[in-house]
Image (cartoon, rainbow, N blue to C red):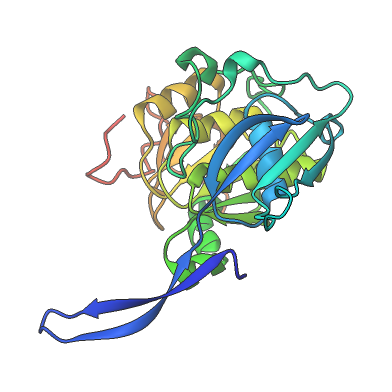
Amino acid sequence: MARITQKLRVLKLHADGTQRRREDVLAAEEPLEIRVNGTSFSVTMRTPGDDFDLVAGFLVSEGVVSTAEHLSRMIVCEGEPGQENTYNVIDATLGAGAEPPDTSLERHVYTTSSCGICGTASIEAVRKSSAFLRPAAPDAPRVQLATLLSLPDRLRDEQALFDRTGGVHAAGLFTLDGELLCLREDVGRHNAVDKVVGWALRDGRLPLRDAVLQVSGRASFELVQKCVMAGIPIMSAVSAPSSLAVEMARDTGITLAGFSRGETVNVYAGAQRIDLTKTDGTDTRGMDDRGTDAAVKAPERATAL
């Protein structure tokens, strides 16, 4: 855990003028250089830990790989002669069937921990084609509303690093029955998602057609894009989505939920995947003409659909 967190002495001030020194635990943030076949591809700021998952998931998000066979190996590169190894450079060797990334998409600036697409060379490159994208079938599996509403609390219960630092995002993959498959934490919300996607790739689980992605923060465009690239049909966020995230979800058939907070949730796209049948077998109120369930209440601060 030494590189995942860092302890610092801080000055804590109180409104009554008193002050004291105390120890605080911070989430670590370090650069990770991602190389593909020996060539530098991107640098991202992340919380160290689960780095192979992060690299694998990042390459899924970039459209470079889509199966475990596409990754021949990943290694941590050694430091320069005479210098200490920082473990901040990973080289991924592509396997059979994987094409090296287009050099025109090479990221020429750092990818920050707050934005997963800021360094992309062109806006057009953001809308990537997914190997797993397909419309939802009429008999596609659905998630119970009660299960969907329970996921934020289930995610929060497993956020060990957040408990220690209060400074990381979390992403969790759940089954449609609410079983937690994988949880990852990181200072970057997009890194947390890449880490769970990378775990799934390395475990041979892609596409994740029967999974729900629950995230601890807002639903941004790049997170919806990552769902598309990994074949995840349902994404739920504790906070609001952006307008572009909703547009992407509707264009690609992703079910997108936001403001999921205990008793209510907003459904911005793909409401047909949410099962509104109660445990007693009765149905809640029907769908309105915009595809949003009238019984799924919207907080006043959320934009009405």
The residue nearer to you, when weighing 252 against 85, is 85
- Residue depicted at x 72% and y 47%: 52
Q: Residue at x 65, y 45 (%)?
A: 54
Query: Observer-nearest residue: 85 or 277?
Result: 85
Task: Give how far across and how far down residue 138 sits, in percent.
Answer: 65, 24
Name the quadrant of the N terminus. Answer: bottom right
Residue 135 seen by the camera = yes
| Residue at the extreme front | 82
Judge by depth and name the residue closer to the eye, 220 or 157. Answer: 220
- Residue 239 x/y as whole percent: 37, 47
Residue at left offset 39%, top offset 55%:
261
Residue 271 in view here: no
The reply, left or right, for residue 203 in relation to residue 85 is right
Q: Nearer the viewer, residue 178 or 53?
A: 53
Q: Is residue 94 left or right of residue 172?
A: right
Q: Quadrant of the C terminus?
A: top left
- Identify the residue shown where x is 70% and y is 34%: 35
Vertical side of 120 occupied by 144: above or below: below
Residue 236 spot, x, y in % from top left: 49, 44
Q: Is residue 203 above or below residue 292?
A: below
